[in-house]
Image: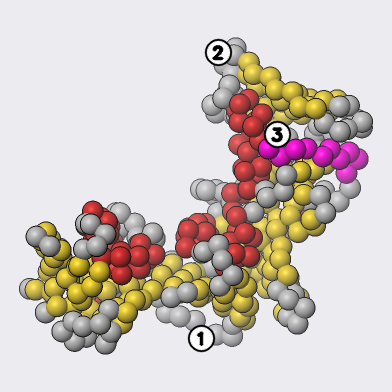
Amino acid sequence: MILVKTQRDLLLGPLQSVSGIVEKRHTLPILSNVLLEKKGDKLTFLATDIEIQITTSTEVPGGDGDSAVTVGARKLQDILRSLPESSEITLNLEDKRLQVRAGKSRFSLQTLPAEDFPRMAISDSDSRKVTVTQKQFRHLLGQTQFSMAAQDVRYYLNGLLLLVEGSELRAVATDGHRLAYASMSLGENVSLPRQELILPRKTVLELNRLLADNEDPVQIEMAFNQIRFQFGSISLVSKLIDGKFPDYERVIPSTLKNLVPLNRTALLQSMVRAAILTNEKFRGVRMVLTPGSLKIMAANAEHEEAQEEIEVDYSGDSIDVGFNVGYLLDVLNNASSEIVEWGFNDANSSALLTIPGNERFKYVVMPMRI
């Protein structure tokens, strides 16, 4: 039976939206598949890895009635991607196989029963809903996500804290060596009780991939152990990390003796050049600040050295301090302002990077010995 007959892009776009979470190798073979479900003129695509579920749909008139099947997500995506853009694609179900036809191309793919495909139960418990623009939320994630841990034994660090309180939505991420904090207003008429949620790392990265840089809304529905994001035709449901996130307010320095305004682009370019000769394992750079001058120095095990110097508008205390250059490049690449402020007390305490006039962003980084 013909499942659908439509243009390539009407299938490829939705498939790419959901297949990002599909693992290549999985203990359950069916989790490498995507569920295709045809009801009337609506074709729904669903993928899950048990922790996250993404659903989207598209209108495809025609076909031989309602049906559902699961097929290898990556294989189908690769086939559709390799076909010409203007191709008309026919998906045909024959003897438990999915036939993909386009022009003179034919592909026969193995399927698994749709009824065996695991779906995440959507929580019906008390939930709170907030709506922001996709651009705002993507920016909030972009300012913080780079500080998430990747494979820390402290599992609660392998994610991002979302905190709702009053009319504010905050995002915080830390890997124990640096911390990024950003916040945004939910509007004057919003007043919500405090709620903390830890999003898994994979969920955050997937949201960053899927969210558009526009003013369209994203509805965030927060439950006790689950969160749902709905935007455009996409619905993303994710389990939450069960744990206690560190008290970020204690990490952010409350008093700073010295503040240095720095040109972000000049500092970024100098850091990129100095990073070429850092030790591959530790990636440390020395920052030597004196009145009017900031020197950035790097060296490696082959006794190679790099030195950059930037003129700065500064007349305070001198400091000679080391940092992981990767941690500084992350924040400089993701900050939107042309001026950043470096605040510090001494060479042994945390540094604070901020944007002048913007209290909604803070980045704390620990020094390192070089």
Q: What's the residue at 39%, 73% (across, down)?
A: 55
Is label 1 in a helix, a strand or a loop? loop
- Residue stretch rendered in magenta on the structure: 256-267
Q: Point out residue 62 in the picture as x, y percentages from the top left corner.
A: 21, 83
Residue at image coords 76%, 43%: 339
Q: Which residue is mark 1?
A: 124
Q: Earlier in the sequence, mark 1 or mark 3?
A: 1
Closer to the chain start, of discs 2 and 3, is: 3
Left or right, residue 235 beside residue 141: left
Q: Residue under circle 2?
A: 302
Q: Amino acid at mark 3?
A: Leu
Q: What is the crowding at mark 1: few (fewer than 14 residues within 10 Å), some, or many (at least 20)?
A: few
Which mark is drawn over residue 267? Answer: 3
Taking the spot 73% from the left edge, 80% from the top edge, the residue there is 190
Q: Position of residue 262 (x, y in %)?
A: 78, 37
Relative placement, left or right, of 94 versus 344 is: left
Q: Quadrant of the C terminus?
A: top right
Q: Is residue 90 above or below residue 342?
A: below
Tell me how far mark 1 sits from mark 3, CA to CA: 49 Å
Q: Position of residue 39 (x, y in %)?
A: 27, 85
Report crowding for label 2: few under 14, some 14 to 19, many 20 or more residues within 10 A (C-alpha). Answer: few
